[in-house]
Image (cartoon, rainbow, N blue to C red):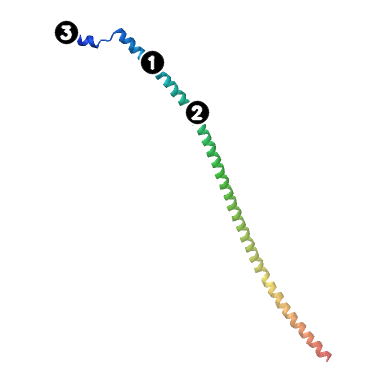
Amino acid sequence: MHAKIDAIIERMVTRDDLAEIRAATHGDLAEMRGDLNEMRTDLNEMRTDLNEMRVALMDRIDRVQDAVTLQHHERVVDVASSERAERLAKAARDDATAIGEIVTPPIRVVHMMRTQLDDLAEQVRILKEGRAT
């Protein structure tokens, strides 16, 4: 039984031991609190930096989106203008074809009449020459 008591006594902590433990622990705790406060400060700075980076990134994305939208509108306007020009050219070509179909028969008649007038003028000249002789 004495052995058990001796073992218990060996494991017992004295007041001096407790004071040493408290002093050592208090120093460690104070250092840990300082480290924790530094980490909180660093974390707050990182949050601020992250927020600034997010704002800058969103601004950049907005500028890129604006540039892409502008290019898209320019291409759409170019395509729309090109399609309109093609439609106008086709309409002009169709109009020219329609006018040609309308004008061609009268032009043929005029050419025929011109040929007939030339023939008549030749006959009149021949008749005048025949009378003159």
Q: Relative to 38, is 110 above or below? A: below
**In front of the other: label 2 or label 3?**
3
Which quadrant is the N terminus positioned in? Answer: top left
Q: CA distance from mark 1 to mark 3?
A: 38 Å
User: Residue reaching furthest right?
Assistant: 132
Three-letter amino acid code at the position of disc 1:
Gly
Nearest to the observer: residue 52 or residue 117: 52
Residue at image mark 2: 48
Q: Which mark is residue 2?
A: 3
Instruction: Classify residue 40 by image quadrant.
Output: top left
Q: CA distance from mark 1 to mark 2?
A: 32 Å
Q: Residue at x 56, y 44 (%)?
A: 67
Q: Secondary structure at mark 2?
A: helix
Q: Relative to 107, is 43 above or below? A: above
Which one is earlier in the sequence, the residue at label 1 or at label 2? 1
Three-letter amino acid code at the position of disc 3:
His
Q: Is residue 7 left or right of residue 31?
A: left
Q: Which mark is residue 15?
A: none
Q: Residue at x 78, y 87 (%)?
A: 126
Residue at image mark 1: 27
Across and down, in percent, residue 23 comes to 36, 12
User: Residue reaching furthest bottom?
Assistant: 133
Q: Residues within 10 Å of mark 3 (few under 14, many from 20)?
A: few
Q: Quick check: marks 2 and 3 in contact, CB under 8 Å?
A: no
Q: Quick check: marks 1 and 3 in contact, CB under 8 Å?
A: no
